[in-house]
Amino acid sequence: MFWNKKDEPSPLGVPLGDLMVMLQPTSIKASLKGNTLTARHEHYTIRIEVVPPETRESENGPIRAVVRMITELPKPILTLFQGKEAEATAAYNAFAALGSLCADRGNVYIGSRLTIYEAEDSWRTLHLPLLMFTTICGTEAILGALRRTMTNEGQRGGTSKWTEPDFAQVEGYLSRMCLCTTGGLGLTAEFGLNEGAVSAAAGDHKTALFQLMADQPHPELGGGLFCLLQMPHQLQDEHRLNQVCLQLNNMEMAAHDLPPHFGAWCPGKLGNNPAYISFLPNPLYAASGIAVNSGFWAMNRAQWANAMLASLGVRA
């Protein structure tokens, strides 16, 4: 009978039961019911739900399922956003690591999304670590950094586990498809947004700038890998830029054929441009090929964002 139905540890083929097991040694109180794992922190709760894709077939092959992670913010924090969702989310998303502040009809939350394809075999090596560390520290990255800023508390430092050989590995893959250079603890690549666009240095104005940096610790999480994708689109009005960033973050949560969303759109540093930032804390260094994957995710995200910005009336 319905009320005797057991909880499914692998809804839609996604083994959420594995995540629950990994959270058991922590202080997080996790429970699994149906297609949703609920992770209760001391001051907030994260809902991790498995949903079917809006369209199963895609250019990247059939989609198995979509995992969405949603953190309802504590009420005292929500007061910071009332009546100014676009400006506040744009400012605080600058502290994002593995999730973004989104706003849906006045409801502000922190969200992340993982689209899983049938042909993928990356659950234990990549997807599970991403979901686990996002559950543990994704929300705290924003709330903790916000607290440090408001109380003038010092920022965390720390040495990154990513070193020069890791950037050389990423360059080995990306240089086959775009202009890519490394130097010290960093990597820079340019993704052409139309045919023939190669580099801004060559006069191309339709390239997205991507950077990986191991010398930029997160104010709350400490050492790790900072990932920054900057679009060339410029908006003259700051409020409009903030609105566009908020719209992009909301779009990222859709159950679509999209690269993993573990980061946030916020104003960039090229002059009123939208940028996507994410930060991989040191424990994620053990996730197989995550830096290389971050490069490919950024390349695909740049193409998607270019199309979405055009649909919003913003062109490079």
Image: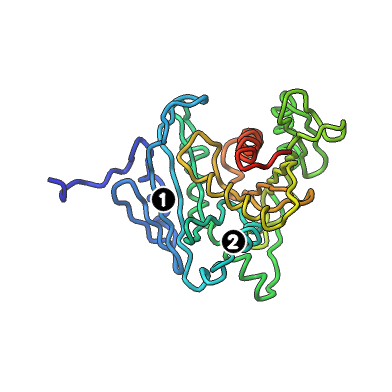
Which residue corresponds to mark 1?
A: 48
Q: Amino acid at mark 1?
A: Ile
Q: Is residue 294 visible?
A: no
Q: Is residue 311 visible?
A: yes
Quarter of the rendering containing residue 147:
bottom right
Q: Mark 2 and mark 1 in contact (Cβ < 8 Å)?
A: no
- Left of 93 or right of it: where is 66? left
Query: Label 1 crowding class (10 Å Cα cut-off): few <14, some 14-19, many 20+?
Result: many
Quarter of the rendering containing residue 70:
bottom left
Which residue corresponds to mark 2?
A: 142
- Tell me the SS state at disc 1: strand
Q: Nearer the viewer, residue 84 or 92?
A: 84
Q: Residue at x 31, y 43 (%)?
A: 9
Q: Residue at x 67, y 70 (%)?
A: 149
- Tell me the SS state at disc 2: helix
Q: Is residue 41 above or below residue 187?
A: below
Q: Is residue 256 above or below residue 79?
A: above
Q: Residue at x 38, y 38 (%)?
A: 14
Residue furthest toward the right?
Answer: 202
Q: Name which of mark 1 and mark 2 comes first in the sequence.
A: 1
Residue furthest toward the bottom?
Answer: 151
Q: Position of residue 283 (x, y in %)?
A: 58, 50
Q: Amino acid at mark 2?
A: Ile
Q: CA distance from mark 1 to mark 2?
A: 18 Å
Q: Is residue 150 above or below residue 280?
A: below
Q: Quadrant of the C terminus?
A: top right
